[in-house]
Image (cartoon, rainbow, N blue to C red):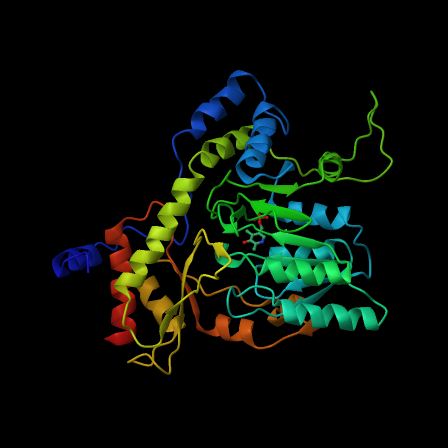
């Protein structure tokens, strides 16, 4: 272990400093762009920072077009609107995710159909998806869209998901809210579906305090999204509307924060991956503890380091909830995995196709403090509490 017992012990005593799960980590470059917005009076939901931020995200990901928005949820909503999802339509969605992946299905008056995960990436299972799409088509109610999620930063199995979606002729929306900076076969996460979305919420790998982006390879669709996100104003000197829109654009001030953050995305991915490696080292050899696997098709940004705790195998039969409470008692924030949406009361009536993977992962899962500004002694402080709780 890289730290002596003395260091571990002295760190453990200093519990006045709370360790957060995934706090913002500023680069110092944000303020220059924000100041420019003030100096030029572009304090508005449009302006040079917004345009530059969109262009820079396209350059760094290879996407052909992108529109900066007020949230990742707004980006998913616009993708569904662009795909013509309407009242009564069925949209298949990964069950193991945050509610924001599926809420826009309800905004459109459509019906979510939750499908379970596979073991390699913990994301949407292509075989189950195939079965779900076949069943829906056979019933005469084919799915209008599919939403896959790159959970905790790891890309889903897009080779197979894309084949299945193409076979059934259903468009794929990729919720890459947690996966900015990850790759799938060398291609930036967010570029694997018809549309990809990012979130710049305060807890994501880079942040604008709040914000999101919709990207795609069809500039006309993205232009349409920009139009819908700006109250659907037709080109006319007066206010003219032939359809209804939303107020979903990102502020030029916040886009300045995003530009400063984007410059350090690579370093943030490296830091989060280093966190995960150190946790692996420090928690090695505890029976019943397993880390989230990395699927062979991609490189995860390791947005959150995540462990699975099998209480029947840990020396003290301690559960992930025992570990979470022990961490909380030492002023350390950790969090269970997303509770699957098929098990959420709000979605209780939704149809599902399940295999038990999401439920099992949820039951055993614990996400550990993963901020890119975490220090090795802080990680050691977290690891020591887990080791003590599970192995005594
Ligand atoms: C954060 C998140 C979102 C929503 O992003 P916001 O910018 O907070 O609206 C959607 N999906 C997943 C998987 C997320 O983690």
Left or right side of 354 for 139: right
The percent position of residue 385, horizontal first and vertical second, equals 27, 65
Residue in view at x 78 percent, y 35 percent:
232
> Residue 200, image x and y in percent?
53, 43
- Give x and y (percent) for residue 164: 69, 63
Quadrant where the N terminus sits is bottom left
- The mark tally for this picture is 0
Toward which corner of the image does residue 307 lie, by quadrant?
Answer: bottom left
Position of 66 relative to 72 (above/below) = above
The residue located at (37%, 58%) in the rendering is 333
Q: Position of residue 53 (x, y in %)?
A: 56, 31
Q: Is residue 102 visible?
A: no
Farthest residue, direction top: 40
For this rendering, which residue is in front, 347 or 150?
Answer: 150
Horizontally, is 82 left or right of 161 in the view? right
Say if 261 sits above or below 309 in the image: above
Q: Nearer the viewer, residue 355 or 333?
A: 355
Locate residue 137: give its quadrant: bottom right
Residue located farthest toward the bottom when viewing the structure as drawn? 312
Quadrant the C terminus occupies = bottom left
The answer to whether one can see residue 140 in this image is: yes
Residue drawn at 37 percent across, 79 percent down: 311
């Amino acid at each position: 272990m890289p730290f002596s017992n003395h260091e571990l012990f002295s760190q453990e005593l200093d519990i006045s400093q709370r360790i957060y799960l995934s706090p913002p980590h500023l680069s110092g470059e944000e303020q220059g762009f924000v100041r420019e917005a003030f100096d030029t009076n572009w304090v508005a939901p449009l302006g040079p920072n917004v345009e530059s931020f969109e262009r820079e995200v396209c350059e760094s990901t290879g996407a052909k077009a992108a529109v900066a928005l007020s949230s990742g949820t707004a980006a998913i909503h616009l993708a569904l609107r662009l795909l013509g999802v309407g009242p009564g339509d069925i949209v298949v969605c990964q069950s193991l995710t945050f509610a924001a992946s599926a809420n826009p299905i309800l905004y459109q008056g459509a019906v979510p159909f939750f499908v379970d995960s596979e073991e390699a990436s913990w994301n949407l299972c292509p075989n189950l998806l195939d079965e779900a799409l076949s069943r829906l088509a056979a019933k005469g109610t084919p799915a209008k869209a599919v939403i896959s999620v790159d959970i905790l930063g790891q890309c889903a199995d897009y080779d197979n998901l894309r084949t299945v979606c193409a076979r059934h002729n259903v468009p794929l929306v990729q919720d890459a809210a947690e996966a900015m900076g990850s790759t799938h076969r060398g291609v930036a996460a967010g570029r694997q579906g018809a549309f990809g979305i990012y979130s710049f919420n305060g807890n994501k790998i880079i942040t604008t305090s709040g914000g999101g982006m919709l990207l795609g390879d069809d500039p006309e669709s993205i232009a349409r999204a920009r139009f819908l996100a700006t109250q659907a104003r037709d080109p006319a000197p007066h206010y003219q509307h032939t359809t209804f829109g939303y107020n979903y654009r990102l502020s030029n001030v916040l886009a300045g924060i995003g530009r400063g953050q984007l410059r350090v995305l690579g370093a943030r991915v490296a830091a989060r991956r280093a966190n995960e490696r150190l946790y692996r080292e420090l928690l090695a050899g505890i029976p019943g503890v397993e880390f989230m696997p990395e699927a062979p098709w991609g490189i995860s940004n390791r947005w959150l380091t995540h462990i699975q705790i099998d209480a029947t195998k840990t020396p003290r039969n301690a559960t992930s909830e025992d570990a979470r409470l022990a961490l909380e008692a030492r002023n350390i924030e950790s969090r269970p995995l997303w509770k699957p949406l098929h098990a959420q009361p709000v979605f209780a009536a939704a149809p599902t196709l399940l295999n038990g993977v999401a439920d099992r992962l949820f039951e055993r899962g614990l996400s550990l403090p993963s901020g890119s500004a975490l220090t090795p002694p802080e990680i050691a402080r977290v690891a020591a509490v887990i080791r003590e709780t599970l192995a005594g």
